[in-house]
Image: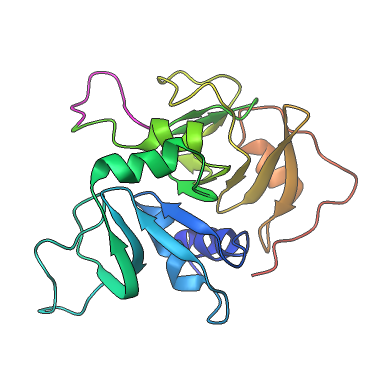
Amino acid sequence: MDAQEIIARRVAQELRPGNLVNLGIGIPTLVANYVRADLKVFFQSENGLIGTGPIPEQGLEHPLLTDAGGRPISALPGASTFDSAMSFGLIRGGHVDVTVLGGLQVDARGRLANWMIPGKMVPGMGGAMDLVSGARRVIVAMQHAAKGKSKIVRQCTLPLTSARPVDLVVTDLAVIGFVDGKATLLEIAPGVRVGDILAVTDAELVVSNKVPEMQL
C-alpha cells in the first residue's frame, strides 16, 4: 500500500451517511475510491455539480463535465448541476459537511497553508479559502514530509489559507487532531513507531501513553 492509498483509505473512514463532501485536487480525489459501497455520500465539485461519479473510461469523457481541477468526471443518476454562484453559496452558507483538501503546511495550531508558494506562478486561489472557512468539518490529506522537510510545522512560513484551524490532518504516517488548539497525535500508520513520527515532525505533538494504529 503506497503513501497516497494509506491517506485516502483513512480519510474515507471519516465520512458519514448523507454527508455532502467536497474533495480538493490531488490526494483528496482518491478518497472516493475507498468509500464503502453501502455508504451513501454526495460528492460536490465546486464548479457546480453534486453527484460526481468515477473517472470515465477513456473515450467516454464529456468535454463539459469536469471537476474543479479540469479533470474529466462522470455524473451519477440524480446528479444536480448549477452555476458557480450557487456552488459557493452552498460552501459559504455552511452546507458542505466535509471538505478534504491537500496541504503544503499545517502549523501546530491547525492553520493550513495550501494555496500558493511565493515566487511561483499561481493559476488562481480556487475555492480553498471558502472551503476552510465555510465547511462544517475540514480534513487535510497530505504526505507528512516533502523533500525531507516536515509539512507539520511550528508556524506556517507560507501564506495561510484561512485563520480558522482545520479539524484533522491525515498523512502517510499519522492522524493528527487539534485538541484544545494543540497538535495531538491520534493514530499512527501500520509499521510506524511514535518515535519515527516525532523525528520527522517540526511541530511539537501531544502524545498519549498509548497511540492506536490506523485500521486500514
Span shown in magenta: 114-122
Asked which quadrant contains residue 155, the reply is top right
> Magenta stretch: dominant SS?
loop
Q: Is residue 1 visible?
A: yes
Asked which quadrant contains residue 77, the reply is bottom left
Please tell me whether residue 18 is drawn above or below residue 188 in the rendered image: below
| Of residues 167 and 188, the one drawn nearer to the viewer in this rendering | 167
156 lies left or right of 189: left
Please tell me whether residue 137 is drawn above or below residue 154 in the rendered image: below
Give the residue furthest to the right. Answer: 209
Q: Is residue 150 visible?
A: no
Quarter of the image for the C terminus: give it. bottom right
Residue that appears at 51% across and 67% down: 41
Percent position of residue 205, x then y: 73, 33
Residue that appears at 45% across and 22% down: 160
Residue that appears at 70% across and 54% down: 188
| Of residues 14 and 88, the one drawn nearer to the viewer in this rendering | 88
171 in the magenta segment: no
188 lies left or right of 36: right
Percent position of residue 73, x then y: 24, 66
Please tell me whether residue 125 is drawn above or below residue 159 in the rendered image: below
Residue that appears at 79% across and 34% down: 206
Percent position of residue 156, x then y: 50, 21
